[in-house]
Image (cartoon, helix red, strand yellow):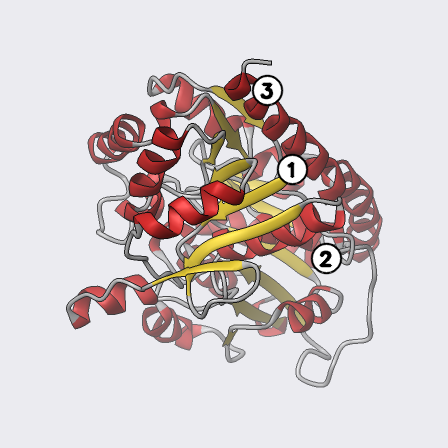
Amino acid sequence: MKIVLVIDQFDDANNGTTISARRFASALKEHGNEVRVIATGKPTDYKYAVRQMRFLPIVEHLITSQGMRLAIPNKHVFEKAAAWADVVHFMMPSPLAIMGLKHVERLGIPHTAAFHCQPENITFTLHLGNSKRVNDFVYTKFRDTFFNRFTHIHCPSNMIANQLREHGYTARLHVISNGISPQYAYGRSPQEDWMRGKFNVLMVGRYAGEKRQDVLIDACALCRHKEDIQVILAGKGPLEGKYRRLAEKLPNPIVMDFYEPSRLLEILHMADLYVHTSDAEIEAMSCMEAFACGLVPVIADSPRSATPQFALDGRSLFPAGDAAALAEKIDWWFEHPEEREEMGRRYAEHAKQYALDRSIEMTEEMFRTAIREQRGS
């Protein structure tokens, strides 16, 4: 198939949606498909380039601090891409996608969408993440301006598919994991000097309101074994300064940095425990990649997060937002290294059902169905 992916930012792998899109494109090619993208950046043989939107400095900073860029819609680009494509797949409901959808509809090109942008990803940035009314408004806005114009939507988890059904989305919902790349496999490596002698507790994710890294920092400050714990927050985002100040109470200096995928993979194979504190999460690839590498996860049990589905037992769950309960879980895993090693192997085995190849095969079938329906065959 000839597949066009529409995503505002594709070049820089500094947010979850872009990372998923890049992995997705590469895997589709490995399965024998031709893939091009419509995105910002320089033109290449695989990219139809569009210009980046510019905003007032304070707004620009807010957007880029989340690892995002927004694109200026260009109908000529969509007409050119649609003339080549068998199917156009939209990754998020941005102005670029909303305008582009009008053109592929007019041209009669098969098209599908993915639901990667949870309303809370927006509302927490505006300090309104816990307002059901505001989140419901965003779900409705997404539905009426974009998603209800599709017949097929890719949902990375049952949790988000259920949310879409509850909010009146009418498309056929395909629950397909974003998929774990094969390089994320069980392995334990000797720790580097900066990790050695400490119990290294890792979390990967943007420093953003819904991710709740503050809960992890508070929990480690409450742990009985806090003198032995080193917190590693892999990521970047607008709350970095806040978290650095909050972490000053920890006995060991916090490690906060953004790591390229190859370096992050090394850290995953050296860390001792993975914690995922997010209040809102569509799937959490970072958590999946961690337990695929053999790290036991401890996950916030939030109704707005799909990540609790991965817990193999209650030792990997804590009530969302409860730092004291999380501290108890961290202390327990610190005190039981043999159980941690055994469960790490079990989690790595558990991860195999979310293999990327399987996800690609299911997504290809969604594309083929959309193409058949559009062509009436």
The residue at which mark 3 appears reads as: 372
Q: In which quarter of the image is the C terminus?
A: top right
Q: Which residue is drawn at 54% across and 54% down?
A: 327
Q: Which residue is drawn at 58% across and 42% down?
A: 3
* Disc 1 crowd, CA 10 A, few/some/many (<14, 14-19, 20+): many
Q: Which of marks 3 and 2 is in front?
A: 3
Residue 365, can we see it? Answer: yes
The residue at which mark 1 appears reads as: 310
Mark number displayed over residue 79: none
Closest to the observer: 339 or 63? Answer: 63
Do tag 1 and tag 2 residues touch (Cβ < 8 Å)?
no
The percent coordinates of residue 39 (x first, y second) are 43, 57
The residue at which mark 2 appears reads as: 335
Q: In which quarter of the image is the N terminus?
A: top right
Q: Which of marks 1 and 2 is nearer the N terminus?
A: 1
Residue 180, can we see it? Answer: no
Q: Which residue is drawn at 77% across and 39% down?
A: 350
Question: Image check: 60 left or right of 354?
Answer: left
Question: Image check: 352 left or right of 101?
Answer: right
Do tag 3 and tag 1 residues touch (Cβ < 8 Å)?
no
Closest to the observer: 180 or 33? Answer: 33
Type of residue at label 2? Glu
The percent coordinates of residue 279 (x first, y second) are 42, 43
The correct choice, above or below, for 323 with respect to 300 in the image is below
Residue 362, picture quadrant: top right
